[in-house]
Image (cartoon, rainbow, N blue to C red):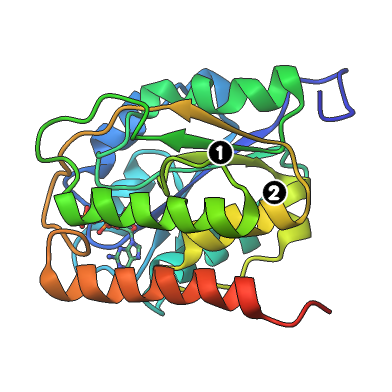
Amino acid sequence: MLNQPERPPLICVIIPAFNEELSLPKVVADLPKALIKEIIVVNNASTDQTARVARELGCRVIDEPKRGYGQACLAGIAALNPQTDIVVFIDGDYSDHGEQLERIISPIIYDDYDFVLGSRALGKREEGAMTPQAFWGNKLACFLMKQFWHASYTDLGPFRAIKFSALKKINMTDTNFGWTIEMQIKVIEKGLKIKEVPVDYRKRIGHSKISGTIKGTILASEKILRTIFKYKFRKHQ
Ligand SMILES: Nc1nc2c(ncn2[C@@H]2O[C@H](COP(=O)(O)OP(=O)(O)OP(=O)(O)O)[C@@H](O)[C@H]2O)c(=O)[nH]1
Ligand SMILES: [Mg+2]
């Protein structure tokens, strides 16, 4: 595994968080700490006590004043310990099941996968956890990735793991809703070893910011489609 079998892999978790003071304690409590070197909470211009709560939970807090899901993830990556082997992303709203982290990292550790996507389509979804527009929007995005890249994704889920070396190769740039699909397209284009595993999903704690609002749904759908076509039709250097 990871070319360094003499030591256990160094695993860091990045949690992008915008006003998640209520859910963060549960997210952090469920993560299997014995497997994790560090949890980085990126406080994305929160107006609540997200940063204080995260610090009290023993997380490293990075402040990112510029809003955006991808912006927060990029700030987390920039703060990673250079020795990191595996980077895990998980949402801060307690929708993902952090206790399933081992499912996400095991294929990297034992089977040398580069990227593992937690698929909510393959796992159990609590009723109402995903809005129909999010579910079908993701299905459409996966269908287009199949047509354009022969990809066999079933979801654009946020709970995912990637080797740090692979993450450096794909040079992520999206600052908001295109983040998850950018990563999925780029790992294919780089010829990396990809696997999906089932993960469960439940209703978020706190207020919905994207999929539960009309504006969020339109903006996210538009951005996801635009990202697909941008990578499909851009000129290859
Ligand atoms: N919406 C949003 N989320 C952010 C931002 N920065 C960080 N996040 C975090 O990104 C994660 C995903 O955002 P969510 O609002 O849960 O997005 P979603 O899961 O698509 O939709 P809902 O759960 O329905 O709101 C959460 O942990 C947020 O706190 C941001 O600028 N906007
Ligand atoms: Mg959510």
In this rendering, the answer to whether 99 lies above or below 58 is above
Residue 81 numbered mark, or none: 2
Residue 61 appears in the rendering? no
Task: Give 149 or 189, whichever is nearer the viewer.
Answer: 149
Tag 2's secondary structure? Answer: loop
Q: Which mark is residue 84?
A: none
Q: Residue at x 72, y 41 (%)?
A: 84
Q: Is residue 55 above or below residue 6?
A: below
Q: Are marks 1 and 2 in contact (CB under 8 Å)?
A: yes
Residue 225 locus on image (x, y percent): 42, 71
The quadrant in which the C terminus is found is: bottom right
**Quadrant including the N terminus:** top right
Q: Position of residue 178 (x, y in %)?
A: 46, 68
Q: Earlier in the sequence, mark 1 or mark 2?
A: 1
Relative side of 193 to 49, left or right: right
Q: Quadrant of ligand 1?
A: bottom left
In the image, what residue type sits under mark 1?
Glu
The quarter holding residue 207 reads bottom left
On the image, the x and y values in percent for residue 15 come to 42, 49
Q: What amino acid type should be assigned to the residue bearing mark 2?
A: Asn
Question: Residue at 10% across / 40% down in the picture?
Answer: 128
Whether residue 88 is visible here, answered yes or no, is yes
Work out whether residue 117 or residue 168 is closer to the camera in this orientation and state it. 117
Q: Which residue is mark 1?
A: 38
Q: Residue at x 38, y 22 (%)?
A: 99
Instruction: Judge from the rendering whether residue 177 lies leftward or rightward of residue 213; answer left or right.
Output: right
SS state under label 1: strand
Q: On the image, which quarter does residue 51 sit in?
A: bottom left
User: Vertically, is 172 above or below 36?
Assistant: below
Residue shown at 54% from the left, 66% from the top: 75
Q: Determine whether the beta carbon of the residue marked 2 sits less than 8 angstroms from the nearest atom of ligand 1.
A: no
Q: Residues within 10 Å of mark 1 (few under 14, many from 20)?
A: some
